[in-house]
Amino acid sequence: MPIPSLKPDWVNFQNESGRLLSLSHSLSSLGPNHRKLVAEIVLLRLFLLTENTIASMCPKLLCGAAYMDNTMPKNLQTATNISKAKALISAYGRSKAVRYPKWSTAKFIKGNMKYTLDQSDPFFLSAQNHGQSLDEMRRVRNQIAHRSSSTREQFRQVVKKHYGGLKPGVSPGLMLISGALGPTTILSQYFGYCRVAVKEIARA
């Protein structure tokens, strides 16, 4: 079996995030309500793409894949195929297997790999460096997807960060497209966060 590569994941991420970015650039041609709705959809797709890319790359590291800069990961455990690598991530070293590993925060990402990858591997620092931005996006994503009392409270913390306090009537969509918070929209900033996070984790 050939050794897997991170390159397809990196190329797919670039292509798909590029398509989403192009869609976000077309928001100005839509009416206000449609702009907010499409911005929320773009955020959902962008965050899912980021999660899925990281989730796809990590088992490959245990199967002998090099980082994009051709350095090798410091594996504590190795696998002969992706299915076995996923099984290691889910169960190795744990008192109870994690049936469906999550990849939406730095804590989850690092926790998924802590038994199979040496703590000195740059992977962990890269994940930690982007933990705050990924967690912020997760809070916005959760409010868009679930709109519960708990997700609303977490989203309020994001609003406080960007507006300096609570601002009545600010929905995820409105915050994402607002041009009053700086030279770029929050949605544009999130694209930057995701692209840098994936680039550094893959060492591309």
Image: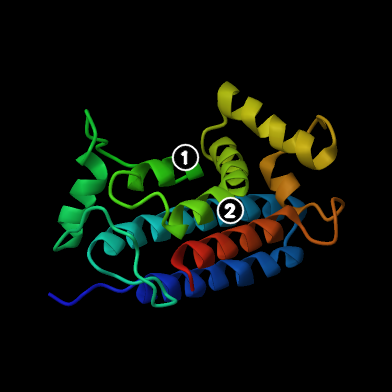
Q: Quadrant of residue 78?
A: bottom left
Q: Quadrant of residue 163?
A: top right
Q: Residue furthest front?
A: 120
- Which residue carries the number 1 mark? 107
199 up-or-down from 140: above or below: below
Q: Percent x, y for residue 90? A: 24, 42
Along the polypeptide, which appears first: circle 2 or circle 1? Answer: 2
Q: Percent x, y for residue 38? A: 62, 55
Q: Judge left or right: residue 56 versus residue 85.
A: right
168 up-or-down from 119: above or below: above
Protein image colouring: rainbow
Residue 142 visible in the snapshot: yes
Q: Nearer the viewer, residue 174 or 78?
A: 78
Residue drawn at x 38%, y 76% as measured from the top left: 7
Q: Judge left or right: residue 64 versus residue 41.
A: left
Q: Residues within 10 Å of mark 2 (few under 14, many from 20)?
A: many
Q: Percent x, y for residue 131? A: 56, 46
Residue drawn at x 41%, y 61% as measured from the top left: 53
Q: Nearer the viewer, residue 44 or 53?
A: 53
- Residue 148 shows which numbered tag? none
Could you tell me which quadrant the N terminus lies in?
A: bottom left
Q: Look at label 1 and name its amino acid.
A: Lys
Residue drawn at x 25%, y 60% as measured from the top left: 62
Q: Nearer the viewer, residue 15 or 40?
A: 15
Question: In what element is the residue under mark 2?
Answer: helix
- Which residue carries the number 2 mark? 43
Q: Percent x, y for residue 105? A: 49, 43
Q: Residues within 10 Å of mark 1 (few under 14, many from 20)?
A: some
Question: In what element is the residue under mark 1?
Answer: helix
Q: Quadrant of residue 34?
A: bottom right
